Image (cartoon, coloured by chain):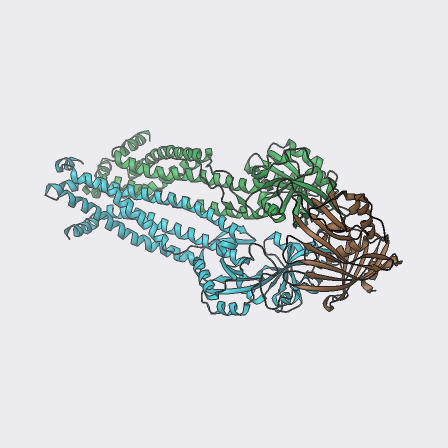
Amino acid sequence: MGFTIKLAWRNIFRNKRRTFIAGLAIGVGLATLIFTDALILGMKANMIHSATAAYSGEGQIHRQGFRLTQDVEKTINNPAEVIAGLAKEEEVEAFTRRAMSFGMITSPANVSSVLFVGLDPESEKPLSHIDDNIQQGDFFSGPEARDIVIGSQLADLLEVSLGDRVVVTVSQAGSGSLAQDMFRVSGIYHFNIKEMDGGFAFVRLGKAQEMLGLGTGVHEIAIKFRSLDSAAEGNTSFWEKYSVNGNEAVSWMVLLPQLKGVLNMVWISLIFMAVLLFGIVAFGIINTLFMSIYERMFEFGVIRAVGTRPGGVRRLVVFEAGALAVLSIAMGTVLGLIITLIVMKTGIDYRGIEFAGTTFYEMLYPELHLQQFLIYPAAVFFFTLLVGLYPAGVAARMSISDALRKSL
Amino acid sequence: MRKMWFLIGLGGLLAFSGPGSAQSQIDADAATIVRQIDALYRSDSSEALVEMEIVTPHWQRTLRMKAWSLGMDKTFIRILEPKKEEGITTLRIGNEMWNYLPKIDKVMKIPPSMMMSSWMGSDLTNDDLVKEFTFLESYHFELVTPDAPEEGLVYVKCVPKEGLPIVWGHVIIAAQRADAMPVWQKFFDEKGNLVREMLFREVKPFGRRRIPAVMELIPRTKEGQKTVLRYLEARFDAGIAPDIFTLRNLRRGN
Amino acid sequence: MLTLRMAFRNIFRQKRRTIFTGLSIVGGFTLAVIFIGWADGSYNNIIDQFTRNRLGHIQIHEKTYLERPSLYKTIDTAQRIGAILEREDSVESWAPRVYGAGLAALGEKSAGVQIIGLDPQRENAATHFDRKIVRGRSFSDLRAGEVVLGKGLAEILQAKTGDQVVLVSQAADGSIAQDLYLLVGIAATGDDLSDRMSCFLPLGTAQDYLVLGDRLHEIAVVVDRLSRVNRIAATLSGLIDDPTLSVDPWQVFARSFYEAMRADKAGMWVMLVIIVVIVAVGVLNTVLMSVLERRREYGLLKAIGTKPRQIVRLVLLEIIVLSLIAMIIGAGLGLGTNAILSRHGIKFSSGLTYGGMVFDTMKSEINLRSFVIPAITVILSAVLVSLVPAIKAARTEPAKTMRMH
């Protein structure tokens, strides 16, 4: 067996140019697979991140039923317990609390309905992008409790700018009586997304709780995970753990179903591409091997004539295919690595494009994973061997006299 | 819908009707002037027949209604004309509001979230209404002299106290020096732009009181809009049955 | 031309080699054709399904309605426009709508709502409104005193079919619009946010309720061929010829969806480039090998007096002819597959859900692009890759090449 391997290896190098070219073709196929996989992973991460990092977070916890009616009475049950639990979770990178209610915001010029949200600036900053999109003013940098941060569209509608007065009216939990308070615009943000820029008014959590009569209650806890995998719907242990006591914990997949759908589509495209790639690679292999066999038909005839069994010939050809595969994999892996590393450095600029309700914030970077360098090369190797069986069979079955008569 | 709000606003105004001092000397003190104007519009109870004309860029209507009020937070308003709206009645108790629609014979509670809007033809907003404190307690007052003062008028500049839910930068009230009758009220935003204007005209006696019978509210930031309130008849502190202000009465239709 | 005849003969002489080289070109070409056809097809398919769901492919409004909707910004010439739309062949269906804001109440519960007046028959044809009814039924006729609520709204009001829902609003003449409607159905459009606020009325009922006469706020149009939507919109705009109205394709009124699709398309381009590279390399591989193998042959030709230029021409011609034959076969296979896929599509178990619609069928599309791009790729790479060895072959010493094995 060892002899056959050595022989196979030497055989393919007899025609260096052909082998090299064929190897390159297959190698490029492999490199492409690796790069595309990395790109897709990067795109997926980027999209999810862009969609969830704006504001919604990768997962949210509410009281059951809150999401449907936004009833101000439905605050999270046992918040202290939930928060303590989250703080200890390995997979959770950051989380923040919010209290919210629909209400009205008035300025001298106009009035508008708005989602009035109280948040904790310190824990909000690592999680959402509001602070990154502040166009004017700041994100609760001062201690002033009357600070309010609104979107550019709302500011336009109300005809207000930094420092102007607005009055917010909401109805309190429990009594339903109206609470009003005056705020000064301390920050204006711009996401370039209509819903964000026109529909929200942010204040400090304490102030909102006071106005809504919630005490220490909150309506929503938004979560960011260390790794996107934890945010998947399939990570049931986490979601089940926090969907207790009348609360419900859901991932972005539930909150933003359209994003999930788009990602599905992207994944399907990848599969299609992989099929295509393998197809082309197959042609390359078959072509090379056949050419090589036919050229050496006489040679095969000779070995058969001196006693090698058909099986031996088949094995030789298959091993040659394998050798070719190894060579290709070596080239392809290196090529794939180089290309991916280059693009990882430069990134692809999708920034500014609005997508599924959010804007791409960051450059797109492909992601390298170890499995790309294990699975794909292995697949190519076995595929090459498989494909090599065909020409191997042909070579093995050819009659000796026919083989001896063949010449180029 | 918006009209509902206007009616609420109207109710609020009526609630401000108060025991009047017929001929009072104008006090040099600004606060006192405002107190007197404020007192003009206060009463323990009132009953009035009011006409409201609403002008918008798209349409123009005049409504006639009867309105009762008790204290600061109970209002009952019934529309008499035009025919399409005849019988529509609004009851307000504190922060809660109900409408009765005779055409479909239903009482509807207005959700708190909608209480705040007052768009429309009626340019009166709930700012005028839902507040628990009066104009008097919410502002600092000082006498001022404008660039082109008119004969016989005093001007009071009202600046809202810090921390109160008021959108205005300041308000200027012009009143008759002789009898403290308000002539106009101008509302400015914090940048000094005139945002809306309220004009008072036709001071008439109603029972033992003299008040401007016509109030015209003109928003200055919107084109072609105004609301005119006209008191046709009014009775103050005449003893009004508290059971007017009940849901039962809402349906029954006085 | 001697060269051409020789080229043809050469091709058919070395059957094996020809077949191999040819096959790889056929393969790459076919797969590229299928990929492009499929990518374009599914892209357009998604747009079509999404816009058909509720928005329509084209919408007609008063000029400034989209930027700031208002009860007063109406289309006043509904009849005339309807007639124009009926006459246009490219218009598959159209649906008129009116919108208003109001308060809906049932018992103690009330909520702010968006009132949507629609024509049940036309709406069923255009956006399959009837399929969105999850409980009860749609309207019986244009002027029925019936209402359909969005799912979330029905939950908030705790309403069930058979209830009488109160609707209060302000009509276009300033008067109070108040009426009672029978709840006949509950709809789920897939957009949870809008379902929490949607209150549907039959068109005639809504127009009476809001005192709009026969005015409309919106006409949604569904066209037969989505790829021509821009052209159709322009045509309609010309026919309607009304400067107070605006006829917009979906890219305008569904801007964020458009941007999303654009980003997706950009991704497709990246993949396309990758595919093109792969096909080129594949062709390179086989063609190069085939040319290099035959250097001895070319040496021989030179030895008997063939001019270098003729050799180059011969090599190139062979490759081009082979490529053309291969492309014809590939085109047949590829476009044929696309034709089948465009009719039946591939159904996936877990589809894409966007705006409540489930897209689980990917359909292909036959278009010029799916042929032209691979064709150019193949010819260019084949020619380019043959050029160097051809020139080299033409230049080397015959004796040297003939000595090579």
Report if residue A73 is visible in the image.
yes
Relative vertical location of residue B93 with respect to residue A309 in this rendering, above or below = below
Q: Quadrant of residue A239?
A: top right
Q: Is residue A359 left or right of residue C195?
A: left
Q: Which chain is cyan?
A: C
Q: Quadrant of residue C288?
A: top left
Residue occupying image coordinates x 54% and y 51%: C354
Q: Give whichever of A333, B138 is nearer the camera.
A: B138
Residue A242 % position (x, y) = 66, 39
Q: Is residue A398 left or right of residue B60?
A: left
Q: Which quadrant would the C terminus of chain A be assigned to in this image?
A: top left
Residue C335 % position (x, y) = 36, 55
Q: Give whichever of B51, C215 is nearer the camera.
A: B51
Q: Colour of chain A?
A: green
Relative vertical location of residue B219 with respect to residue A205 in this rendering, above or below = below
Q: Give whichever of B92, A266 is nearer the camera.
A: B92
Q: Which chain is brown?
A: B
